[in-house]
Amino acid sequence: MQQIRLALLTLALTAGLTRPGTSQAPLSPQASIGTLRHEWNTALTMKDTARMGRLVLDSALFVSDRVELRGRDAVTATFGRLFANRPSFRLRFVIDTVIPQLPTGTDQVVSEYGTWEESWPADGGAVILRGTYYDVWRRQPEGWRIALHAFSVTSCSGNPGYCGRF
C-alpha cells in the first residue's frame, strides 16, 4: 500500500511539472534526482531559462572540452542564446545511474551520469550530437541544485561543416 501511495504522489508531482506555460520552482528538498532531471528536460523543451536557473547553483560549473561556463548566469545566458539562434534546438538527458556520496549516510551531494542527445536543423543537414554527462547535485535548504555538469560528445552526425570540428 505504501508503494501505491508513493507512486500516486510521484505521478501527481510529475504531472504538475509539465503543465504548459508554467514556470515552477524546483520541488521540495526531498524531490528525487530523477524528478529534478525531468524538470530540467521540461525546462529545455519549453526553452525556459528561468526554470533552468532554479535548478543550478549560483557557483555551478558546466564544462566539456569546448565549453566552460561558471555560474548560473553564464549557464542561463548560454542556453538563452542557443534557444534564440536555433529555434528548433532540442536537448534531452537520460539518467543511467544516481550515486549517493560516500561515506554511506551522507546525503548532501549525489552524482548522476547518463547520456544526452542534442539536435537542430541546419543548412547542409540536421546536426545530431550524442554524448555522456556527469552531474554533481548539492542539497541546499531549498532543494537539490546542479553544482557541476561535465559532458562529452561521443558522436556527431549531419552537417559536415559542423561535425567536422570534432
Image: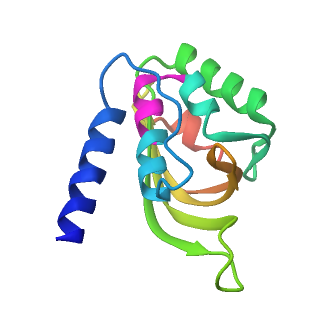
State the image quarter where residue 104 is shown. bottom right
The residue at the far front in this view is 1
Q: Is residue 151 above or below residue 82?
A: below
Q: Does the magenta stretch include residue 47?
A: yes
Quadrant location of the N terminus in the rendered image: bottom left
Q: Which residue is drawn at 77% across and 45% down?
A: 60
The x, y position of residue 17, in whole percent, is 36, 35
Q: Nearer the viewer, residue 64 or 23?
A: 23
Q: What stretch is highlighted in magenta?
A: 41-48
Q: In this view, does 46 lie to the left or right of 68?
A: left
The x, y position of residue 114, in whole percent, is 49, 63
Q: Does the magenta stretch include residue 45?
A: yes
Q: In this view, does 79 lie above or below 106?
A: above
Q: Nearer the viewer, residue 115 or 147?
A: 147
The x, y position of residue 43, in whole percent, is 47, 31
Q: Residue at x 61, y 27 (%)?
A: 79
| Residue 158 seen in the figure | no
State the image quarter where residue 13 is shown. top left
Colouring scheme, one of rainbow, by chain, secondary structure, one colour: rainbow
Majority SS type along the magenta span: helix
The x, y position of residue 65, in whole percent, is 75, 53
Q: Nearer the viewer, residue 148 or 91?
A: 148
| Residue 140 seen in the figure | yes
Q: How many marks?
A: 0
The residue at the far bottom in this view is 103
Q: Which residue is drawn at 71% across and 33% down?
A: 75
Q: Which residue is drawn at 46% across and 22% down?
A: 23
